[in-house]
Image: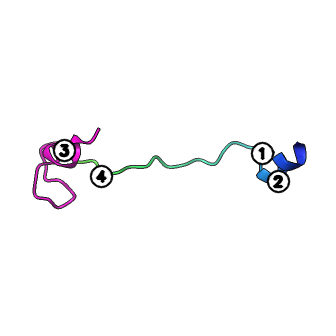
Amino acid sequence: DIEAAERAGADRGGAAPKRRPARAAPTVGRNEPCPCGSGKKFKQCCGRRG
């Protein structure tokens, strides 16, 4: 019903708040040392994910 939608904030009269994109790791070159501190190259460590 309308009252429930208003309580939930559905009728705010504007765009949704802007959100920053989430980043798991800083921008690192594939051949640079991994920022996690393992001592391995990024491509052999955390760069394998995804």
- Tell me the residue at 82%/46% (across/down): 5
Going from N to C along the chain, the mark reached first, 2 or 3, is 2
SS of the residue under disc 4: loop
**Pointer 1 local density, CA inside 10 Å: few below 14, some 14–19, many at least 20:** few
Q: List the residue tagged with mark 3.
A: 29
Question: Which is nearer the eye, 1 or 34?
Answer: 1
Q: Nearer the viewer, mark 1 or mark 4?
A: 1
Drawn side of residue 36 relative to residue 1, left or right: left
**Pointer 2 local density, CA inside 10 Å: few below 14, some 14–19, many at least 20:** few
Mark drawn on residue 26: 4
Residue type (three-letter) at the residue carrying disc 3: Gly
Q: For the residues marked 1 and 4, what is the alpha-carbon distance in whole angstroms?
A: 35 Å
Asked which quadrant contains residue 10, the reply is: top right
Mark drawn on residue 10: 1
Q: Please report the bounds of the magenta region as a residue range.
A: 29-50
Drawn side of residue 47 relative to residue 24, left or right: left
Q: Main secondary structure of the magenta part?
A: loop
Mark drawn on residue 7: 2
Asked which quadrant contains residue 39, the reply is: bottom left
Residue 11 in magenta stretch = no
- Tell me the residue at 66%/44% (across/down): 16
Furthest toward the bottom, the residue is 37
Going from N to C along the chain, the mark reached first, 1 or 3, is 1
Instruction: Give the image location of residue 24, x and y in percent.
Output: 35, 51
Instruction: Give the image location of residue 35, x and y in percent.
Output: 21, 57
Residue type (three-letter) at the residue carrying disc 2: Arg
